[in-house]
Image (cartoon, rainbow, N blue to C red):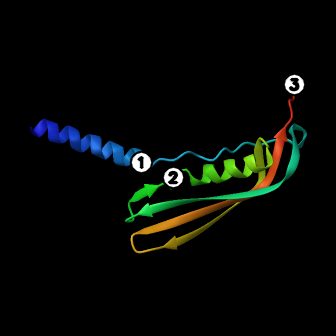
């Protein structure tokens, strides 16, 4: 029985750690000859932290905002990027809103 409780404890600890990971933002450097600027775009995404420890769409909000800004103009990437964060607080949760803005570009097929 001791063995089972240790395995359950390790598995639970692993799940907690897995919940604390997120997807990094897509960052690349482009030469001006590699793209055409489509225009300025911005988007935001919100994540919550329930009871100060349970993340709800918290870890990937940067990527969601970046993808939404790119998709709004039908482009491939975002340059001249700016990131702003605002937060709010309530009794049982806190929320974090990330706003991403920049110029959306369409990549050229360079051989």
Q: Position of residue 12 (x, y in %)?
A: 28, 45
Residue located 18% across and 41% down the image: 6
Identity of the residue drawn at 83% across and 41% down: 106
In the rendered structure, which disc, 2 or 3, sits on the residue that comes first in sequence?
2
Q: Secondary structure at mark 2?
A: loop
* Residue 108, percent from left and from top: 86, 34
Query: Considering only vertical position in the picture, is 7 above or below 78?
Result: above
Picture quarter with the C terminus: top right
| First along the sequence among labels 3 and 1 | 1
- Disc 2 to disc 3: CB gap under 8 Å: no
Q: Secondary structure at mark 1?
A: loop
For mark 2, what is the residue? 59
**Rendered residue at 13%/36% (across/down):** 3
Mark 2 to mark 3: distance in Å?
36 Å
Query: Label 1: which residue?
Result: 19
Q: Position of residue 96 (x, y in %)?
A: 54, 64
Circle 2 crowding by C-alpha within 10 Å: few under 14, some 14–19, many from 20: some
Pointers 2 and 1 in contact (C-beta within 8 Å):
yes
Q: Position of residue 21 (x, y in %)?
A: 47, 47
Left or right: 5 as drawn, with respect to 100: left
* On screen, residue 36 above or below 85: above
Look at the picture and state if 14 lies above or below 83: above
In the foreground, 49 or 11: 49
N-terminal label among 2 and 1: 1
Q: Is residue 33 left or right of residue 53?
A: right
Mark 3 lies on a secondary structure that is: loop
Considering the image in quadrants, where does the N terminus appear? top left
Give the residue displayed 45% in from the left and 74% down from the top: 90
- How many residues crowd around disc 3 within 10 Å: few (fewer than 14), some, or many (20 or more)? few
Alpha carbon distance from label 2 to label 1: 8 Å
**Residue labelled with disc 3:** 111
């Amino acid at each position: 029985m001791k063995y089972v409780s240790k395995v359950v404890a390790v598995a639970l600890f692993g799940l907690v750690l897995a919940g604390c990971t997120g997807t990094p933002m897509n960052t690349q450097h482009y030469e001006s000859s590699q793209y055409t600027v489509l225009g300025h775009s911005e988007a935001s995404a919100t994540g919550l932290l329930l009871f100060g420890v349970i993340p709800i769409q918290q870890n990937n909000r940067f990527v969601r905002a970046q993808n939404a800004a790119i998709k709004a103009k039908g482009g491939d990437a975002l340059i001249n990027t700016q990131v702003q964060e605002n937060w709010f607080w309530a009794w049982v949760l806190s929320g974090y809103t990330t706003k991403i803005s920049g110029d959306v570009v369409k990549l050229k097929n360079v051989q």
